[in-house]
């Protein structure tokens, strides 16, 4: 049995989807790095159980995607390491659905990182009555090594569904604490109360073959609230296999000294092992990731800011520790798997905020020897023996640049950026951003040779040379372009540039949501098509398209023939929904309110008088 067979792939989107008859109540995700393009595709899986799309823009948008994005603000919460959000594409107004669902997590040291990769999702049974108190719920916990990025590396994930019990489950206590602490940043007390009330009666079901004989999974957040990594708790290992893309001498030596019966086994990347001391590696049975799988491409940063992990390749990014040791009474019999975000580094085990899940099994296929054989004997071998070099790589100049960049990024994150938005006389908006004046002055004394520029996420017209002042204002924005993100470019020298999105605490006007919706639904035909989808989500995919048709000169305004063609079937569906599907009516009421608040539409209002008069007959059933 090959538990880690590379052909048995877990689809990222499918792992988030609710099962038939269920719907996503809310979802909490954590990640070290975040690409907005990847995040934009996740709501479709969460809220419509459909596979992730490769591209999502105003030009290829469908009604189900718009409906999913509309749910994000209230029902999806993503936490990311501070200033580690990126984008590879131009600004899209669709990204305006996301910024108020993302929270940057600061750290108190330049050597620490917020590094867990976890999803906790709550599902409820579908109901058509918005007034019902749905008590039929379940949870899914996904613990993975993958960030929310487009990287195609070899990662690992454990997705576990749950069932309710009558007895309290102490194994979930640390999970509740972690999620509560994160959600306190959002102010969502209703979700915090659900976590406290429900999770203590939830048991997560480990995947086969770790679910035999009633074994449960144990969730381990660590270096958080004084919680240690479970790998540090055990003093001796009978067997140990470490799979980690990042390693260091200190951690390898510490773990090796705890192995009493046979040398530990290490699977890592060749470059990482080249940096380790030969005497350290000589005490391990070492294997390198097959370099043939790592093709040239873009680069994604590792946990300490190095541009080492190759994106658009199959590089090693999974983090797995398999140990046979006395983890509690009689646990020395089991193969204990620790899967999650933790690298075999000092930062991973002692400093970073990490998360792992522990699985146990007696099955032969989960043993150290079988897992090693799986990696060796794949159709295309994933690993090959590593030949220890006589002298380790020691690039002092690279290390100096890396530490300078790391310190610069940390100090930049401490500048206390704040923002405000004002409406100008011409109906457009001004975004004012300022940093702490004293910290700004101190920053430039230390990094006087660095060039830093900031731009609006939605526009390149106005540029802020950060050295010229600790505050700046950007003018001429439309309401639908407003965002809490600024594009940041930091240039240390001609060979070292860092680009990311700075998220500034800022209050976004409520009307922005409606403006975005009206910019997308910019003709009555598109609005009515979206309305039909709300009443009948099983519309054929080609009928759902509401993307911009650049070949169609008719954009905006109303067309009487459209209303005449659609009004009768919509009326009939509204009649049906008023008695059988009031959730659909509630959804329509939500979007009508948003569109009504949006100002400055086309010459004719998007919501025609004919529709408003018809909707008055049904709006009372949406409450």
Image (tube, rainbow, N blue to C red):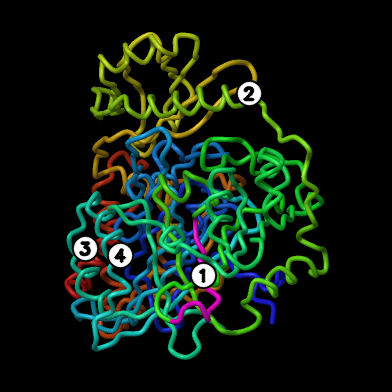
Q: Residues within 10 Å of mark 2 (few under 14, many from 20)?
A: few
Q: CA distance from mark 1 to mark 2?
A: 38 Å
Q: CA distance from mark 4 to mark 3?
A: 14 Å
Mark 2 or 3: in front is 2
Q: Position of residue 53 (x, y in %)?
A: 58, 59
Is 24 on the left-hand or right-hand side of 615?
right
Q: CB of mark 4 within 8 Å of CB of mark 1? A: no
Quarter holding the C terminus? bottom left
Q: CB of mark 1 within 8 Å of CB of mark 2? A: no
Q: CA distance from mark 2 to mark 3?
A: 47 Å
Asked whether 443 falls inside the magenta stretch, the response is no
Is 406 on the left-hand or right-hand side of 155?
left
Q: Position of residue 114 (x, y in %)?
A: 40, 46
Residue of label 4: 174
Q: Is residue 127 visible?
A: yes
Residue of label 2: 396
Q: CA distance from mark 4 to mark 1?
A: 18 Å
Q: Which sits earlier in the primary sequence, circle 2 or circle 4? A: 4
- Name the secondary structure under disc 4: helix
Q: CA distance from mark 3 to mark 1?
A: 24 Å
């Amino acid at each position: 049995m090959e538990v880690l067979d590379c052909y048995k792939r877990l689809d990222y989107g499918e792992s988030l989807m609710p099962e038939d008859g269920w719907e996503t109540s809310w979802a909490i995700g954590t990640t070290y790095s975040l690409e907005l393009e990847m995040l934009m595709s996740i709501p479709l899986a969460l809220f419509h159980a459909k596979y992730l799309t490769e591209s999502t823009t105003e030009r290829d948008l469908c009604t189900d995607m718009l409906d999913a994005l509309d749910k994000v603000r209230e029902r999806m919460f993503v936490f990311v390491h501070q200033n580690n959000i990126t984008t590879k594409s131009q600004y899209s107004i669709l990204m305006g659905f996301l910024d108020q669902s993302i929270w940057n997590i600061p750290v108190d040291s330049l050597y620490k990182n917020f590094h867990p990769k976890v999803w906790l999702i709550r599902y409820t049974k579908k109901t058509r009555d918005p007034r019902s108190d749905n008590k039929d719920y379940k949870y899914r916990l996904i613990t993975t090594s993958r960030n929310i990025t487009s990287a195609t590396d070899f990662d690992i994930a454990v997705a576990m569904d749950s069932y309710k019990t009558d007895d309290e489950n102490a194994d979930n206590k640390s999970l509740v604490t972690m999620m509560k602490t994160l959600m306190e940043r959002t102010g969502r007390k209703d979700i915090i109360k659900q976590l406290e009330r429900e999770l203590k009666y939830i048991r997560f079901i480990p995947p086969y073959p770790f679910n035999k004989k009633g074994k449960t999974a144990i969730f381990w957040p660590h270096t958080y609230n004084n919680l240690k990594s479970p790998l540090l708790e055990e003093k001796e290992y009978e067997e140990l296999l470490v799979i980690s893309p990042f390693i260091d001498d200190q951690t390898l030596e510490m773990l090796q000294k705890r192995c009493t019966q046979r040398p530990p086994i290490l699977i890592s990347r060749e470059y990482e092992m080249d940096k380790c001391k030969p005497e350290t590696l000589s005490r391990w049975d070492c294997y390198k990731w097959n370099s043939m799988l790592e093709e040239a491409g873009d680069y994604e940063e590792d946990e300490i800011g190095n541009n080492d992990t190759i994106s658009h390749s199959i590089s090693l990014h999974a983090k797995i520790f398999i140990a046979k040791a006395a983890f509690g009474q009689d646990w020395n019999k089991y193969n204990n798997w620790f899967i999650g975000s933790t690298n075999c580094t000092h930062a991973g085990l002692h400093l970073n905020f990490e998360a792992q899940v522990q699985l146990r099994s007696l099955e032969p296929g989960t043993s150290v020897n079988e897992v090693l054989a799986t990696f060796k004997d794949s159709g295309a071998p994933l690993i090959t023996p590593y030949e220890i070099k006589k002298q380790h790589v020691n690039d002092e100049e690279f290390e100096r640049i890396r530490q300078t960049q790391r310190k610069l990024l940390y100090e930049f994150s401490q500048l206390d950026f704040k923002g405000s938005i004002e409406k100008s006389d011409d109906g457009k908006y001004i975004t004012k951003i300022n940093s702490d004046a004293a910290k700004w002055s101190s920053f430039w004394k230390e990094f006087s040779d660095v060039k830093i520029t900031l731009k609006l996420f939605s526009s390149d017209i106005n540029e802020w040379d950060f050295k010229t002042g600790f505050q700046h204002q950007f003018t001429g924005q439309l309401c639908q372009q407003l965002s809490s993100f600024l594009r940041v470019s930091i240039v240390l020298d001609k060979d070292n540039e860092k680009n990311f999105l700075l998220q500034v605490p800022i209050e976004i006007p409520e009307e922005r949501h409606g403006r975005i919706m009206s910019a997308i639904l910019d003709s009555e035909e598109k609005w009515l098509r979206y309305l039909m989808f709300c009443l009948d989500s099983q519309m054929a995919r080609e009928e759902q398209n509401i993307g911009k048709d650049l070949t169609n000169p008719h954009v905006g305004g109303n067309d009487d023939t459209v209303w005449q063609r659609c009004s009768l079937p919509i009326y009939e569906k509204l009649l049906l929904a008023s008695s059988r599907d009031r959730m659909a009516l509630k959804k329509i009421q939500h979007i009508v309110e948003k569109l009504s608040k949006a100002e400055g539409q086309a010459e004719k209002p998007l919501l025609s008088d004919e529709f408003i008069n018809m909707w008055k007959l049904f709006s009372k059933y949406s409450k």
